[in-house]
Structure formats: structure tokens, C-alpha cells
Amino acid sequence: MATESSGVAPVLAPKLAAIAGLVVCRDEPLAKHCTFQIGGAVEWYLEVEGTAALAAVLALVVEHETPFQILGLGSNILFPDAGLPGIVARLSGDFRRLEIAGTTVTAGAALSLAQVARRTAQAGLVGLEALSGFPSTVGGAVYMNAGCYGTEIRDVLASAALLDPDGTGRRVTAEELEPGYRETNLQGTSTIVTEAVFELAVGEAAAAVARIDELNRRRWQSLPSGVANAGSIFKNPPGDYAGRLVDECALKGRASGGARISPRHGNVIVNEGGAKALDVLALMLEMRRSVRERFGIELVPEVILAGRLAEIWRADAA
Ligand SMILES: Cc1cc2nc3c(=O)[nH]c(=O)nc-3n(C[C@H](O)[C@H](O)[C@H](O)COP(=O)(O)OP(=O)(O)OC[C@H]3O[C@@H](n4cnc5c(N)ncnc54)[C@H](O)[C@@H]3O)c2cc1C
């Protein structure tokens, strides 16, 4: 049962049930839907199969002032132990369409970026290989301007289709998203990415697929495997690495409840089983404090802190 409530459940229930193209789950544990495997229940968990259903949900969100969060693969998010009030929605159905026309690739926001990279490589198109080694939807990667091995999504993104909270659809170029290091101007807004258009280059299919396999092998050697995590916890400060700074503070291996700073990588926190969001947050606060004291550098979270966790994080900085 969600411990937080938006208070509009009795009104919302019949209205959600009346929308076609929606799978509706009540009091759904968020731990099931993120790679950290942490988080209490959300009041409403929706799978949204098309633009009409998404627009109808957004209209209800505005009408009832209901908290709303869109979710991709949940690979860069920490949900609170008390869960979330309102709605968490994941895109599916029509949002999984992939179209390849010449060197132009149109990908629905719900597709796995790794799958898009592999399928375009198999079709003899290159550009996405370096972005295939981490869990992400296309929408989540655009929102985060995700990147790896010196390539960012902005490098291959021609445009993105967006849906604003008032139900207005629009298309923007990559530059209009003002992409920076793991950031875009979508962050802090409720605008949803529904589709991305990539402009790729012609290459040799076998070589592109081999490059994906090689980069993935390298990647998984450097990260903790077989244990729940959300990748990098902090952004790298300019000219340095968050993992190195944490390592210098002798924090690698430090535990709080079921969470531990990975002994393999100082910028990754792993859930060893039964970790609470507050265990992860306690480690993050300790990492920030130690790095600030030792180096005078302020670590900035890369992982999205959902609900009250963001407030706790900000309050502790004061
Ligand atoms: C093992 C591991 C390795 C990782 N390595 C890397 C790496 O090398 N490089 C890197 O950049 N990241 C890495 N990450 C982090 C993560 O994979 C990326 O940030 C990824 O792009 C998040 O995508 P997602 O679909 O899982 O988004 P989620 O984690 O589900 O969501 C993240 C944020 O994006 C928003 N969002 C999701 N979908 C949409 C949408 N359609 N429209 C608008 N907003 C949306 C959510 O609301 C949330 O605020 C790694 C994570 C793990 C677990």
C-alpha cells in the first residue's frame, strides 16, 4: 500500500479505467521497476500505449493536480521508501516503433537504446554503438543526454518529439534541448519525450556489431555485475572523476544498511539486498561531505532523486 496519497484516488479510479490503451495498476511497488530495486509503492502505475492515452492521462493530471512522473527503464532513479503519491507512467505499445529510412532512424521513446543501436548496426548504420552498453530507453537517454566513451546522445540526435503537460505536441532539434553533461532543459519540467530521430552514417554492419560487443565487454568489466545499482551516482566534476575523489576519501566498500559503495567503483552504490533509499542517501551524503571537506569540490547527483529524497538532499546541503 502506498503510504503517501494524493487524496484523489476515488475520483481518479473510474476516469483512468475509462481511458483506452492504458494498463492501470494500483499501489504498485516501485522497487519492481528500477535497477536499484528500491522504493515503496506508487498510488497508480500506468503503462501507456499511445499518444491519445498519454494526452488523456496528462489532462487528468492537470485537472486533479496529481503528482506525475514518467519512467523509462528506471536505471537512473532512486525512489523513496515511502513510495510516491499520484502516478508513475511507463510508455509502451506505439512508443516502441522503429523506422529506418536511409540514414534517418525514428525511434519511439519506449524502445531500449541498446536494441536500437544493435538493430541499426545490423542495418549497416553507425553512430549509436558507444551508447549501447547501459540500460536506457530512448526517452530516458534524450532526457539525460546520456553518454559513454566520449559519445553523447546529442551527437546523433537530429530532433525529438515532445508532449507538454498541457497536451501540446511539438518537435525540437537537439540544440533546442540545450544538452550539457548529463543534462537537458527537459530536467525539472514535466515534458515527455515521445520519439527521437537519429541521423546516422553508413558503415559496415559486421564491424559495427563487433564494436558493440567489444565495448559492452569492456564496460561490464569495469562495473559491478550481478548486483542492483543505478550506474554513476554523481556527475564527474570538470576535469576529474567522482569515483577517484570518493576513492581518495577511502570510502570504497563503506556500507549503510543494505547499501554499499562498490569496492570496484567509487562512484557506484550497490544494493546488496534489502537496501532502503535512506541507506543509499546516507552514503551519498557522506560521499558529498567527505569530498567537500577534502577537496573543496561539490558533488552533484547524476541519479534522479524522486519525491522527498530531493528535498532531504537539498536540506542537508544548507
Ligand atoms: C549499470 C548501469 C550503467 C550505466 N551507465 C551509464 C553510462 O555509461 N552513461 C550514462 O549516461 N548513463 C548510464 N547509466 C544511467 C542510465 O542508464 C541513464 O541515465 C539512462 O539514460 C536512463 O534511462 P532510463 O530509460 O532508464 O530512465 P529512468 O531511469 O527511467 O528515468 C531517468 C529520468 O528520465 C526521465 N524520463 C524517462 N523517460 C522519459 C521520457 N520519455 N520523457 C521525459 N523524461 C523521461 C525520468 O522521469 C527520470 O527523471 C547507467 C545505469 C546503470 C544501471
Image (cartoon, grey):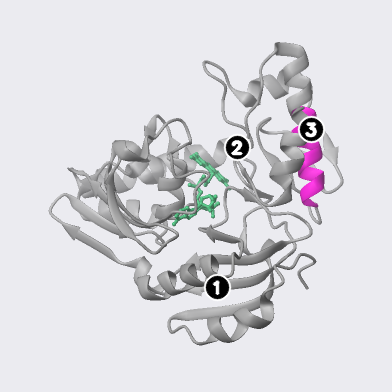
Disc 1 residue crowd, few under 14, some 14–19, many 20+, Cα 10 Å: many
Q: Is residue 167 left or right of residue 218?
A: left
Q: Looking at the picture, which amino acid does disc 1 mark?
A: Leu
Q: Looking at the picture, which amino acid does disc 3 mark?
A: Asp
Residue closest to the eye, 132 or 300: 300
Q: CA distance from mark 3 to mark 2?
A: 21 Å
The disc at residue 232 is 2
Quarter where residue 131 is shown? top left
Disc 2 to disc 1: CB gap under 8 Å: no
The disc at residue 46 is 1
Reading the image, the residue beneath label 3 is: 316
Quarter where residue 210 is shown? top left
> Who's the residue at 60% across and 37% down the image?
232
Circle nearer the viewer, 2 or 1: 1
Disc 2 residue crowd, few under 14, some 14–19, many 20+, Cα 10 Å: some
Q: Is residue 56 left or right of residue 74?
A: left
Q: Is residue 277 left or right of residue 56?
A: right
The disc at residue 164 is none
Residue closest to the eye, 314 or 195: 314
Residue 245 percent coordinates (x, y): 68, 20
Q: Main secondary structure of the magenta part?
A: helix
Which residue sits furthest right? 257
Q: Which residues are magenta?
A: 276-287
Residue 272 percent coordinates (x, y): 78, 50
Q: Earlier in the sequence, mark 2 or mark 1?
A: 1
* Quadrant including the N terminus: bottom right
Q: Secondary structure at mark 3?
A: helix
Q: Is mark 2 within 8 Å of ligand 1?
A: yes
